Amino acid sequence: MSTATVPPEPREMVPDDPRRRLTLVHGRHSFADITRMVCAPVEDPAPLGWWVGFGIAFACLGLFLAMVIYLVLDGIGIWGLNNPQGWGFDITNFVWWVGIGHAGTLISAILYLFRQKWRTAINRFAEAMTIFAVICALMFPTIHVGRIWMLWMALPIPNWEAIWPQFRSPLLWDVFAVGTYFTVSLIFWYMGLIPDLATLRDRAKSKIRWIIYGILSMGWRGSARHWSNYEKAYLILAGISTPLVLSVHSIVSFDFAVSIIPGWHTTIFPPYFVAGAIFSGFAMVMTLAIVARRAFRLTDIITIDHLDNMNKIMLVTGMMVGYAYSMEFFISWYSGNPYEMFTFVNRAFGPYAWAYWIMISCNVLVPQIFWFRKNRRSIPVMFVASILINIGMWFERFVIIMSLSRDFLPSSWGYYKPTWVEVCTLIGSLGLFFTFFFLFLRFLPMVAMAEVKNVLPQADPHGHGEGGVPAGEPA
Amino acid sequence: MTKIVWDNAALLSLKTAKSLGVKDGDLITVTVGSRELEIAACVAPGLADDAIVLPLGYGRTHAVRVGDGVGFNTYALRASTGMDTAAASVKRAGGHYMLVRTQDHQALEGRPLVREGTLEEYKKDPAFVREMQEATPHLTFYANREYDYSKPPQWGMAIDLNRCIGCNACTIACQSENNVPTVGKKQVKKNREMHWIRVDRYYVGDVEDAEAVHQPLPCMQCENAPCENVCPVNATNHSADGLNQMVYNRCIGTRYCLNNCPYKVRRFNFLAYRKHEPEVIKMAMNPDVTVRMRGVMEKCTYCVQRIKRKKIEAKIAQRDLKDGEIVTACQQVCPTEAIIFGDLKDPESRVAKLKADERSYTLLDELNTLPRTFYMARLRNPNEMEKA
């Protein structure tokens, strides 16, 4: 970077001089300003845009319900699945949603342990997204079974027949892994919300708000003891969540890796899936954050620096999945297994080559634009890129599942085409997600106020660390 | 041979089709004298050039629910002047017709699935069949298996590719024995046929002058069944006599077993195929076999109901089962006796003797699935003219 011609940016999070750590929140806001800014979307009347967005999302949710009812009444045959392809859109959507549900916990837990203070502006938001995405994810394995009314048999419920689930099945591990992840993420998110819910309670003007937020904030008074307990619990939950970020998608990848199907049976899947999940999760946070920060005037809190950092993470994880794609090819050749070799050549040049190249373009080529600072800080560029990455990550799962179309015996090869029902179910699941998300924007503080206040310069009277003024210099 | 179901079609060789500019499924007009018939064309490799084969028996008009409007009435071209063969002219009629097949891919892709050789090769090296594939050690992580499979009987099935003529009788026999639903043309188009035993047909050799090989494929009843450990609800598991069992009541239909079956012999009830059967069809069901509902997986059971019946009979008579006493439906109907079922642990049984033969091999042996169904490679003895 040529500092000679361009004056140094004052709002850089990591300047060249390591002693200089500049402000995370722009615009010299006071504590009260932060409270006002974050509470405004919850307390002011909803803007027209919210109603429009919520209306569309809610309509899509209705579509989802209609599709599920149709499915339960008529059977899986209304989808395009067949023999050899027992899975298609259903599990593609499941893995895609679980992947999206990764960024939240990564931001709130792993970045917390690494003391990445910039996370405070986006963690609430990302955690909410995680929870809603995991809810969407859980929908698919639930509805995709042939006899949904017998689903309880997949749970370890003691019964008079003394029949247990099959503990060697990766699908059962999924039940536990995703269930645990959801539970812990929900607790973590809710616990982080308590101080902010208390703020909303204290600001409540109507009785009903006062009661509801009062119950939800569980008697929080903000005493030193409360804060001490809170910080400890936060750290413990962050510690519990961290391995879950890695485990849940590793276990989702076992759905494929544990099988014997060429193209599925590979040991690279766990790390590759985790990287892909973080990649898609950040892309989804990006898409939502870009819109929400503008719509609710939070650009000083969720700053361009945050987006810049997230773009860097997307560049890194994008290259990780790119590496995984090429390594899969190498290993299939190196293994000398003709079925594996065939599967990978078939992926790139077979009937589903179109999906493969969408995946490569969106996931490997698109993030390369983030090598350039100009692109990392350009809202339109990153908005389009984040959407393309989400599309690419959906196709990654689709391409993997389509390995089923051509496996061992050529006599059973087939081609899977989704029906309109499957497409509507996918759209409907987006409706489910956005319905939750719009309700979240309206009824809960989308930024962790208490945490953001912590990283304001005035929170640190000694001017250490994240203060607006570098240490050792007069204010 | 064509794998076409719910239709008949005019069979043309590749060369003939090319010279007429006809693709598979195109409608053609066949004219014999003054009679004309519009019929869908099916490209059949290995057929004699400049000949058209028209299968009879389709295109019925008074066959009620399932029979009406199926295929083309080729009797219309048959006259007393040419009952079996007649000079005909063919031209493209324009338009396309949907032909559905139970097998979409016709080539073996160089995979050692159907193994064959000549008598000379066999004489030179009797073990050549097994050498077509790298030997794989059959290792396992699980030291103590649930069943050791050492106690007789241990069921197995030999399928002699030398004998199989690809007539599909086994498929139909199985269908009526095991209450396998008929799903109709549209469902077959979506690859949802329910056959528990299918006859795979591959074209081998030169494309222009291809030969066909057949391979009947029931469930392999793997000892290390990949379908079993992926089922989250334990709906498929093993019996002590080596049957890979399917518990319909327990199945929730995740279809993971179907995905993980390397032989793709599992069949899923995508829709309620049995719900709207007329009463007379219901009365025709085999009472010994459960009728499956939608949303559950099913597959070949080695006719477990027949096994049980004979076992009970033997037990009542206080005697041992004799080899050949239990006959599966596919075996019973096979005109060439290509299918032999029996106890692998009985050294005198026919199936055990076949298993010991050098010609025997198992499909996808390297996956360590340890199939109970095995194949006897096809040996051919081509005459001198054919070799040239």
Image (cartoon, coloured by chain):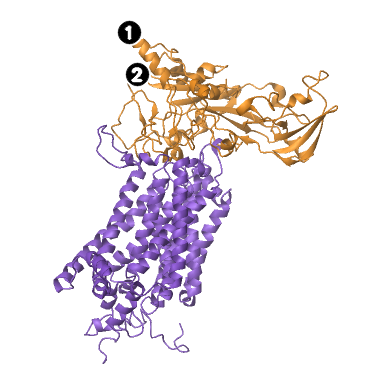
Picture coordinates of residue B153, whole percent (x, y): 36, 18
Front residue (pair A430, A115): A430
Front residue (pair B348, A277): A277
Q: Residue furthest bottom?
A: A474
Which element is circle 1 on?
Answer: loop
Q: Which corner quadrant of the image does residue B295 belong to?
A: top left
Quarter of the picture containing the C terminus of chain B is top right
Q: Which residue is mark 1?
A: B318
Which element is circle 2 on?
Answer: loop
Picture coordinates of residue A310, whole percent (x, y): 40, 70
Rendered hue of chain A is purple
Q: Which chain did the renderer colour orange? A: B
Mark nearer the viewer, 1 or 2: 1
Q: Which residue is mark 2?
A: B152
Q: Is residue B284 visible?
A: yes
Amino acid found under the numbered disc labelled 2: Pro
**Label disc, if present, on residue A110 of the rendered structure:** none
Q: Is residue B124 visible?
A: no
Front residue (pair A293, B142): A293
Same subunit: marks 1 and 2: yes
Residue A281, above or below B237: below
Tell me which label, 1 or 2, sits earlier in the chain.
2
* Residue displayed at 55% across by 23% down: B172
Amino acid found under the numbered disc labelled 1: Gln
Picture coordinates of residue B300, whole percent (x, y): 46, 27
Residue B323, above or below B209: above
Quarter of the picture containing the N terminus of chain B is top right
Q: Using residue A148 as the reference point, say whether residue A469 is left or right of it.
A: left
Q: Residues within 10 Å of mark 2 (few under 14, many from 20)?
A: few
